[in-house]
Image (cartoon, grey):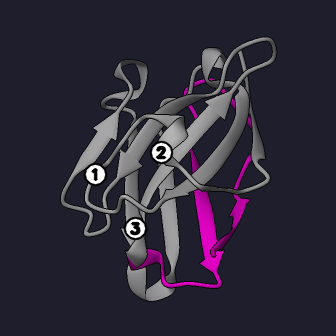
Amino acid sequence: QVQLVESGGGLVQAGGSLRLSCAASGRTLSSYAMGWFCQAPGKERECVAAINWSGRSTYYEDSVKGRFTISRDNAKNTVYLQMNNLEPDDTAVYYCAASPGRYSATSYSSQYAYWGQGTQVTVSS
């Protein structure tokens, strides 16, 4: 099992940046593909970015391409989501998740077995 704790959320103005971190404990992060999901009020949870175990394969949801970057440091057991040029529509709770299918940067939430508690990101206009 792995435990995940997100940090780095907050309130930012449109056009600003935030860097989310997801620290893992309990098992080495290199055993998992990792994903960042967001859930806005009244909407379903969706994947915004994912990365396979080595970092060589990534996935981005269309609306964040060119603005968000997912990365990982397996030595530090941490995954990051750099969010630039934030927009009010990015406002949501952001969750990191771990998938045992470590070779695939999957966007399907059903493939993820472990989830963090989430961190709130609020973008003001």
Q: Residues within 10 Å of mark 1 (few under 14, many from 20)?
A: many
* Real-space Cα separation, disc 1 to disc 3, in angstroms: 14 Å
Taking the spot 49% from the left edge, 84% from the top edge, the residue there is: 28
**Residue labelled with disc 1:** 104
Mark closest to the chain's N terminus, 1 or 2: 1
Determine the image quadrant of residue 107: top left
Per the model, the C-alpha gap separating discs 2 and 3 is: 19 Å
27 is within the stretch colored magenta: yes
- At numbered mark 1, what does the secondary structure look like: helix, strand or loop? loop
Left or right: where does residue 41 sit relative to residue 81? right
- Residue range in magenta is 1-30
The 10 Å Cα crowd at callout 3, few under 14, some 14 to 19, many 20 or more, is: many
Magenta stretch: residue 8 in it? Answer: yes
Q: Relative to the observer, which residue lies in front, 5 or 100?
A: 100
Q: What residue lies at 35% left-to-right and 20% top-to-bottom? A: 62
- Quarter holding the N terminus is bottom right
- The amino acid at mark 1 is Ser
Q: Is residue 41 left or right of residue 82?
A: right
Does 98 sit left or right of 53 as displayed?
A: right
Indicate the secondary structure of the residue bearing disc 2: helix
Which residue lies under the disc numbered 2?
111
Amino acid type, callout 3: Arg
Point out the frontmost of discs 1 and 2: 2
Q: Which of 20 and 50 lies nearest the eye of the viewer?
A: 50
